[in-house]
Image (cartoon, helix red, strand yellow):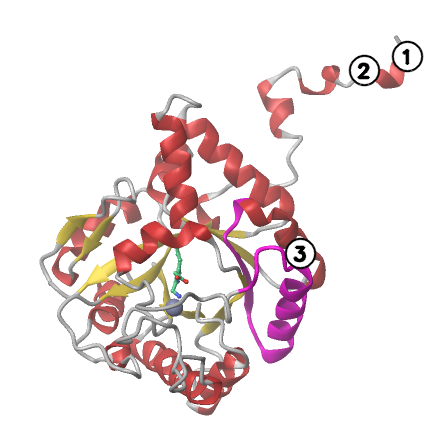
Amino acid sequence: MDISSILQGGYHHPLSRQWQSKRQLTKSMLMYPIFITDDPDASQLIATLPGQRRWGVNKIEEFLGPLVKKGLQSVILFGVPMKCNKDHRGSPADDETGPVILAIKKIRSLFPDLYVACDVCLCEYTDHGHCGYLHPDGTINTEPSVARIAEVALNYAKAGAHCVAPSDMMDGRIKSIKRALIDNGYGNKCTLMSYSAKFASSLYGPFRDAAGSAPSFGNRKCYQLPPAGRGLARRAIQRDVVEGADIIMVKPAMPYLDIIGDAAQLAPDHPLACYQVSGEFAMVHAGAAAGVYPLRDMAFESVDGMLRAGATLILTYFTPDFLDWLDN
Ligand code: PBG
Ligand code: ZN
């Protein structure tokens, strides 16, 4: 055989196989999405998200303590209001006595080294379940939506969030949040992570069960991106860079590795996050339960794809598992 035909000599050993990757998963790349609800003592399993729970503020120490010991370095909070009064403007989002603000303060005091990011959106808190304000005809009313989202983001920053991450997909919200942070003295104290290329995906189902954020009518296709819309995703990424995003995110991850690759090329000087969303997590679990593959192998394979595409930060419900798996 010709000399140049032989590749196997280069990867016959487990160590030389590791050298084939440009980057490998480390604990610092993992951001764990967690659900905080307004019953302070809650610990409710979420049926469609294997092993994940809605936690009350009083349970945060027993929930996160062991993970922090294993090397958990960052979380992203999602509020799950059960008892509050939802309205057209999503008032409970930044209620001082609501689960998100209370949880930020609690986590900051319990775990001073843990990085706390907050998802910013209105859909968990609006009576109609959409991510912004609506016109009477049901379409998005952009200007007041963006102003309200910036207000919520600022209030999370004031409560102590290290990072705010708007997932609403309203046009112009990055600029407006950045302005609000700067004008109020948080420009150098709070990171702005944009869900820049967030697609209208079928993979958010378990999350919407978990968070009670399914829209009461219609869908999100007029603000989240069409799955085939690569050009739109590229434009959204470039726009959010210009508007002041500190981190760019692509979401979901697995079916959108080309978009992660595009983002790595369009925003080469930014950290690049991707979100392995609820439906991806459920899908990987379902395949393992069906005997298609061992869970651990597929979980690593899924993340290897994201790293190869260029992600430097991964939001995943597998975080607690990876903390164990990376140790042995
Ligand atoms: C809310 C939001 C969603 C997710 C994160 N923030 C759902 C949606 O847009 O309907 C999805 C996360 C997941 O599926 O894990 N805007
Ligand atoms: Zn939303």
Which of the two residues, 8 or 200, is positioned nearer the viewer here? 200
In the rendered structure, which amino acid carries the disc numbered 2?
A: Ile
User: Which residue position is annotated with label 3?
Assistant: 264
Q: Residue at x 32, y 74 (%)?
A: 160
User: Which residue position is annotated with label 2?
Assistant: 6
Proximity of marks 2 and 1: CB atoms separated by less than 8 Å: yes
| Magenta part of the chain | 225-254
Q: Is residue 58 left or right of residue 228?
A: left
Estimate the spatial distance between the alpha carbons at disc 3 and disc 2, rounded to whole Å: 31 Å
x, y (%) of residue 201? Answer: 48, 55
Question: What label sits on residue 2 in the rendered view?
Answer: 1
Image quadrant assignment for residue 161: bottom left
- Can you name the residue that lies furthest to the right here? 2
x, y (%) of residue 278? Answer: 38, 49
Image quadrant assignment for residue 166: bottom left
x, y (%) of residue 144? Answer: 42, 89
In the rendered structure, which amino acid carries the disc numbered 3?
A: Ala
